[in-house]
Amino acid sequence: MIDQNKLVYLIDRTLGSKGQKLKKQNEYMYWTPFTSHHKPKLQINIVTQKWHCWISSQGGHKLYQLFKKVNATHEQLTELREIVGDSRPLSSNHEKVKEKVCVLPKEFIPLGRKYSSTTYKHAMFYLNKRGITHEDILKYGIGYCEEGMYTNRIIIPSYDGDGQLNFFVGRDIFESKMKYRNSPTQKDIIGFDLFINWDEPIVLCEGPFDAIAIKRNAIPLFGKTILPKLKLKIIEKKVKTIYISLDTDAIVDAMKMVENFMNHNIDVYFVKLTEKDPSDLGFEKVTKLLKETNKTKFSDLMRMRLNGRTKKYMEI
């Protein structure tokens, strides 16, 4: 059993501020050490250890990660381990060798605040046109760049389950020939992993705008295929239900996923998009479509094979 009073006192000392207890059970709000803001925006659950900064979008599932990020002392890290019950030995040199990690462009500007620049106005107009709300911007830590390699691009970050940046998408706001310029890191990652509840049904879609539009446990594939890391986690987490919602030009890829997951005894719902992708349809229409989708059966797969062409399957 965690001594909650000791833990709160330790967090207070480590962050240098006294936490404000929220009405929600076991939740505290602190001044964020990651950026400046006029209100406390770092939320911590002292039982689950989940933490999230609502301004910088940094977060994770373990307080140890937070303590490492704020350069906690060896003594503070040791005390944390004792309180939360982690008995693994802590090396005197507790800093791990840094792996090659994904980082946001140095020119990145968060869109959570208002700016007077023309580029900011164009960026907000583009996001509003795509149905992205202010709440979405804060939740996903969306920003933009006014200069550098990602000039005039919306930047949508993706974080892993520990709150570490694992990928980002750079979308041109002026519809240039090169619409996307993404992070140079490899794509075998789990998109928006930080926000996924693996105990609930998940939705697989192509891009981040689709996932944000769906607004419910949606994972962007950043493409049309499912990569090994995501596939493995779905199986390890024993996900029971999956909705597959890919664009109309990715039906073959979608059906491969359907068959793969059905072979693992997962209930699969193949969402038949007609002309538009989820980001074009918007939240209400996507929600209606998901509700109206029936569970896919093996007979559906056999019918598709017999038809020979996936277009015929869409007409069934």
Image (tube, grey):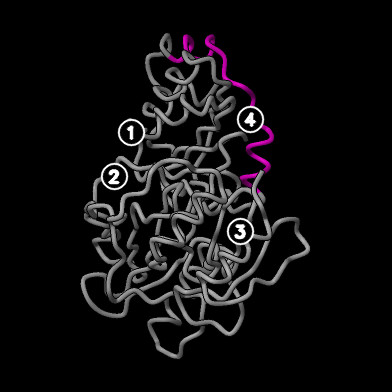
Q: Which residues are magenta?
A: 285-304
User: Is residue 290 part of the magenta span, yes or no?
Assistant: yes
Q: Give the label, 4 or 1, closer to the camera.
A: 1
Q: Residue 225, position in %: x, y? A: 34, 34
Q: Residue 212, position in %: x, y? A: 53, 54
Question: Closer to the N terminus: mark 2 or mark 4?
Answer: 2
Could you give the CA–CA distance between mark 4 and mark 1, rounded to whole angstroms? 25 Å
Q: Residue at x 37, y 56 (%)?
A: 165
Could you give the CA–CA distance between mark 3 and mark 2, rounded to whole angstroms? 37 Å
Q: Which residue is mark 3?
A: 7
Question: Closer to the N terminus: mark 3 or mark 1?
Answer: 3
Quadrant of the image containing the C terminus: top right
Q: In the figure, is residue 265 to the left or right of 226?
A: right
Q: Residue 192, position in %: x, y? A: 46, 49
Question: Closer to the N terminus: mark 4 or mark 1?
Answer: 1
Name the residue nearer the viewer: 76 or 25: 76
Name the residue nearer the viewer: 241 or 14: 14
Work out whether 123 lies above or below 89.
below
User: Is residue 156 part of the magenta span, yes or no?
Assistant: no
Report the amino acid beneath label 1.
Answer: Leu
Graded by Cα atoms within 10 Å as few (under 14), some (14 to 19) or many (20 or more), the crowding at tag 2 reads: some
Q: Give the label, 4 or 3, closer to the camera.
A: 3
Report the amino acid beneath label 4.
Answer: Thr
Residue 187 badge: 2
- Choose top left, top right, bottom left or bottom right for residue 22: bottom right
Q: Which residue is mark 1?
A: 227
Q: Residue at x 38, y 19 (%)?
A: 309
Q: Residue 157, position in %: x, y? A: 40, 59
Question: Closer to the N terminus: mark 2 or mark 1?
Answer: 2
Work out whether 217 lies above or below 32.
above
Q: Which residue is mark 4?
A: 293
